[in-house]
Image (cartoon, grey):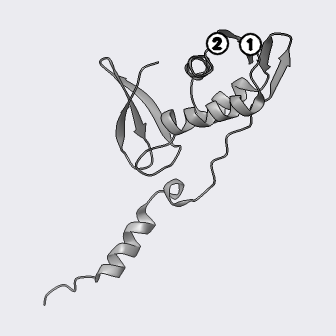
């Protein structure tokens, strides 16, 4: 006797159940707001390492992006970032959101579960949720 073939909906339900739980959750991704403190002609971001660890990125990579975007010099000082010049908290958070859009979220599925991988001289943004891979610019 011939084996009964399951219908489409049954196969679809089985496929959805087989997906990892992480990819089916719809949790809102919220980046911590940068705490910019202007002292004289310098700006200190006291929670910089917290932001970088939340994004799962190296603090140096994030700092290099922010320095180029803000058009200033700066450095890492233990757990905080120091920017030369006055940078408002709104401008800092706007640039961090731009970094997240370009270097953290997947262009295919929109999830933040990505890693930056280097193959030869080219850097790629590899999504751990959907498996997509997109080239990104060097900083």
> Mark 2, residues whose alpha carbon is within 10 Å: few (<14), some, or many (≥20)?
few
The furthest residue to the bottom = 1
Res. 37 mark = none
Give how far across and how far down residue 80 sits, in percent.
75, 18
Q: Is residue 42 left or right of residue 29?
A: right
- Label 2 sits on residue: 72
Name which of mark 1 and mark 2 comes first in the sequence. Answer: 2
Q: Is residue 19 above or below residue 103?
A: below
- Label 1 sits on residue: 85
Q: CA distance from mark 1 to mark 2?
A: 7 Å
Question: In percent of the image, x 51 and y 48: which residue is there?
Answer: 111
The furthest residue to the left = 1
Which secondary structure, mark 1? Answer: loop
Q: Nearer the viewer, residue 32 or 102?
A: 102
Question: In percent of the image, x 49 and y 35: which residue is there?
Answer: 102
Question: In percent of the image, x 51 and y 60: which residue is there?
Answer: 24
How many numbered marks have been drawn onto this rendered protein structure?
2
Give how far across and how far down residue 105 sits, in percent.
50, 42
The reply to whether discs 1 and 2 touch (Cβ–Cβ < 8 Å) is yes
Q: Is residue 81 left or right of residue 3?
A: right
Give how far across and how far down residue 53 sits, in percent.
65, 30
Give how far across and how far down residue 126 sits, in percent.
40, 37
Question: In percent of the image, x 42 and y 67: which residue is there?
Answer: 16
Q: Is residue 15 left or right of residue 92?
A: left
Q: Is residue 65 above or below residue 6?
A: above
């Amino acid at each position: 006797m011939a084996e009964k073939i399951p219908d489409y909906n049954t196969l679809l339900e089985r496929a959805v159940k087989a997906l990892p739980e992480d990819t089916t959750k719809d949790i809102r991704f919220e980046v911590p707001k940068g705490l910019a403190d202007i002292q004289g002609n310098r700006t200190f971001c006291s929670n910089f390492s917290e932001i970088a660890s939340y994004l799962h990125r190296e603090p140096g990579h994030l700092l290099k992006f922010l320095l180029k975007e803000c058009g200033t010099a700066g450095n890492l000082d233990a757990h905080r970032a120091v920017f030369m010049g006055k940078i408002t908290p709104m401008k800092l958070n706007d640039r961090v959101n731009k970094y997240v859009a370009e270097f953290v979220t997947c262009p295919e599925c929109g999830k933040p579960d990505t890693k930056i991988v280097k193959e030869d001289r080219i850097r790629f943004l590899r999504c751990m949720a959907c498996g997509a891979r997109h080239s990104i610019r060097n900083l």
